[in-house]
Image (tube, grey):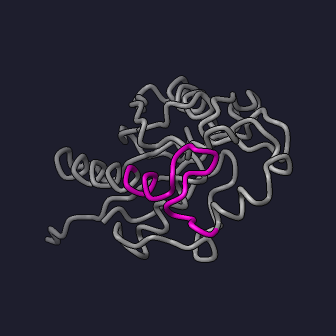
Amino acid sequence: MDVTPRSTRLWLVRHAAPLVAPGTCYGALDVPADAEATRIAAERLAIALPTRAPVFCSTLQRCEQLALAIQALRPDLTPNPDTRLREMDFGVWEGRAWNAIAHSDVDAWVAAFATRAPGGGENLASVLQRVSSALQAARQWSTDHGAADVVWITHAGVARCVAWLEHHGPGAMPRSEDWPVAAPAWGDWEIRDLA
């Protein structure tokens, strides 16, 4: 009999499309998601997600909406809020059109991509640190509870952090040109090995 433990899968689920004007800088800005898009994503996830998987979600309402919509269809999937899964905070840039932010300010951020806090908000090094902490907690949860799957309902930035950490580890700091651009589409997901 094979007793090799199965690796734990991390389901990285992105919230549905937010109700925000195209071209707007929003990270920590607490905007709602489109209700119909959230319903459709929840229906798809209710079919796809494994039974009784632990669900952790960003505390921003666009993620909470999806988590609660999934729970309404699948009562075995109870969301647990986790602030570490929030999107990056862009400070005073939040809610502004990207093209209204001074090019020199954006260039200064790009030049010191990991360490400069855009708009005086949160720098990428801090986001990577909190996502790394959440990954360690998910691994520990999996070990303690024998969970084969862990679900995060989160944001594109967090998914990119997971991809970076998976390939480079927690000590490496990215340059802007090295940063992963791929992330799940709104209301979609990707599955990664949590090991």
Q: Is residue 50 magenta?
A: no
Q: Position of residue 101 (x, y in %)?
A: 79, 48
- Percent x, y for residue 51? 39, 41
Q: Quadrant of residue 36?
A: top right
* Above/below status of 182 relative to 21: below
Nearest the viewer among 19 and 15 is 19
Q: Position of residue 6 (x, y in %)?
A: 27, 64
Q: Is residue 80 above or below residue 16?
A: above
Left or right of 119, for residue 152: left
- What is the quadrant of the C terminus in the image? bottom left
Q: How far across and down, in percent of the image, does residue 184 sit?
A: 63, 57
* Residue 168 figure quarter: bottom left
Q: From the viewer's perspective, is 7 left or right of 118?
A: left
Picture residue at 43% right of the left edge, 30% below the top: 79
Q: Nearer the viewer, residue 117 or 176?
A: 117
Q: Is residue 125 magenta?
A: yes
Q: How many marks?
A: 0
Residue at 43% across, 52% down: 126
- Magenta extent: 111-130
Residue at position x 55%, y 27% from top?
73
- At x 65%, y 66%, the residue is 110
Q: Which quarter of the figure is the N terminus placed in?
A: bottom left
Relative to 71, say whether 162 is above or below. Answer: below
Q: 142 left or right of 132?
A: left
